[in-house]
Amino acid sequence: MLIRNCLIVDPSLPEVDFKATAKTDVRIDGGVIADVAPGLKAHSSETVFDGDGLWLMPGLIDLHTHLRDFNQGAKEDIATGTQAAAAGGYTTVVAMANTVPPIDSPMIFKQLQEMIAEKAVIKVLSVANVTKGMAGQEITEMALLSELGAVAFSDDGLPISNLAVLRRALDQARAIGTLVISHPEDRDLSGSGVMNESATSTALGLAGVPTASEAACIAREIEVARITGAQLHFAHVSTRASINLIERAKADGLQVTADTTPHHLTLTDTDIGAFDTRFKMNPPLRSQADQDALCIALKKGILDAIGTDHAPHTDSEKGAGFNAAPCGVTGMETALSLCLERLTAAPGNLTVLEVLRKFTSAPAKILRLPEPAIAKGRNADLFLFDPKATWQYDVKSGQSRSKNSPFDGRTLTGRTLLTLSAGRIAYQYEPAMDRWLSIEGLALK
C-alpha cells in the first residue's frame, strides 16, 4: 500500500506548522512502514491512496475500554468492540477485566486470549483482576497472569476498600514490574447516588454522588502507593479535588498517573435533561468548573491521558429508568473528534499534537510500550483522518453493538477515513473509497 501526499502528524516529533509542513508519501509492506519520503513511485501491485488534505497519524491507544463478550455478548463482543475502536482511529485497546466471568484466573485469561486472536481486528491488551471474584479480599495469581500477557491489574467498578489488600497488590505489582488501575470511588459516600450531587440533582429529585467520593478514595490510595513505591493509575478522573491530590502526589515523586474521558471533557451534569440514561455513567458527569479543571490539568500534564471508558449496554437495560439503568456510555467512534474540538479551545488550549499525545504517547508510557511513531521499520498501526470533515454522528450506523451514546445526533468536525492494524485494513469509511487510485492487491481483514 502507498499513501500519497498526506500530512504526517506524529506525536513523537516537535510541534507541527500545518501551513509549512510538506506533504509526503508512506509505503507499507509486510505490516510495517517500508518508506517515508515525498514522491515515492507506486509499484504495479500496490494499492494507492490519495491522502491530500488528510492527516496520517499513529493509531490511538485506549487505556480503558469494556469489550464485554463471554456472557455479555448481547452488549458487545470483541469483534464489534474492536470494529468500533478502529472506526475511531484506535489500533490498540486495553480491555478491562470486570467481565462475566471475571478475568481472575489463568484459565479464564487463556480463554480470553483465544477469543481475541479469533475476533479482534486491532490489537487488544488484556487487564486481569486484582482480586479473585473482584471481591476485594484474595489477590489473584498476578505474577502468572502477567507472564501470560496481562498488561495491568484492576477490579475497575469494584474499588478495593481494604487498604491492606491494596497494599499487597501494589507490592506484588512493583515486584513484577506492572501497574494497578484504580476506579477511584468510596462506595459508601456514593451510596444510592445516580448523578453528580448538585443543584441539578436536587431539581431532578435524583440522589447525588458527592465529588468527595472520588477524591477521598484517591487520597487514601495515594498513601498506599507512597509506602509501596508501586505504579498506580487512576482511571476516569472527574473532579477538581482529585486533580489537586494527583498534582501533589506527582510533586512528591510518586508513580501516580491518571486519565479522564471524552464525556467528562465535553458534557456536564446539566446535560442530563429529561432523565436521559445515555448520560448516566460512573463517575457521573460533573460541573462546568470541574470540566474546565480537567482541561487545564491535561494541558499541565497533571492528567496524563484520555481513555474512553467505552461501556456498552443493551437498549433494554438503558431503558429501565434513570435510577435502575446501568452506568456507562459508548464512545470510541467519537472520542478524537470531540477532544480536538474541546481541548484546542479555552481553557485548555492544547495544540493538536498535545491532544494526540494524550491518546498515543501518554498511554504507551503508562503501559510501558514503545512510543508510537511514523518511521521506517515501525509497525503500520496508522489511521488517516480528515480534519475538515463535518459530519453528524448517527449511533444506529455505528460499529458498536450497543447504542448508548450521549453524542447521538451531534455534529462533529474531523473523521477517520481509514485505519490500518499491522498494515491490514481494520476500518474504512466507504464514502471515501473514491480516493483510492488503484484497488489491485487490496487486502481486507
Image: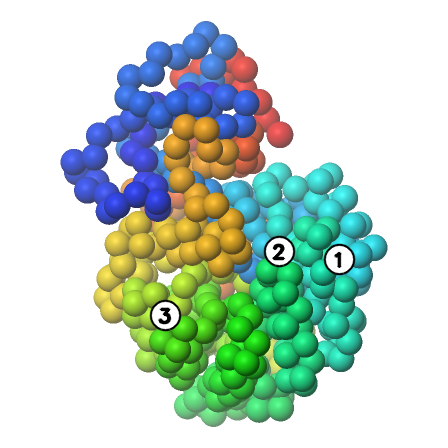
Residue 442 point in image, percent of width and height: 54, 20
Residue labelled with disc 3 = 302
Q: Residue at x 35, y 46 (%)?
A: 11
Q: Which residue is mark 2?
A: 151
The residue located at (45%, 37%) in the rendering is 382
Residue plotted at (50% across, 28% down): 32
| Mark in front: 2 vs 1 | 1
**Which disc, if any, is residue 192?**
none
Whether residue 429 sits left or right of residue 173 in the image: it is left
Residue behind mark 1: 144
Residue 434: which quarter of the image?
Answer: top left
Badge 2 density bin: few <14, some 14–19, many ≥20, Cα 10 Å: many
- The Cα atoms of the two marked residues, 1 and 3, are separated by 33 Å
- Residue type at mark 2 is Val
Task: Residue lying at the far left in this picture: please name it.
Answer: 20
Q: Nearer the viewer, residue 136 or 147?
A: 147
> Horizontal placement of 333 versus 130: left or right?
left
Image height check: is 99 above or below 117? below
Q: Residue furthest front?
A: 175
Please identify, in this view, whether the residue under mark 1 or under mark 3 is nearer the observer: 1
Label 3 – label 2 distance at C-alpha:
23 Å
Amino acid type at image mark 3: Ile
- Residue 139, compared with residue 80, is above or below; it is below
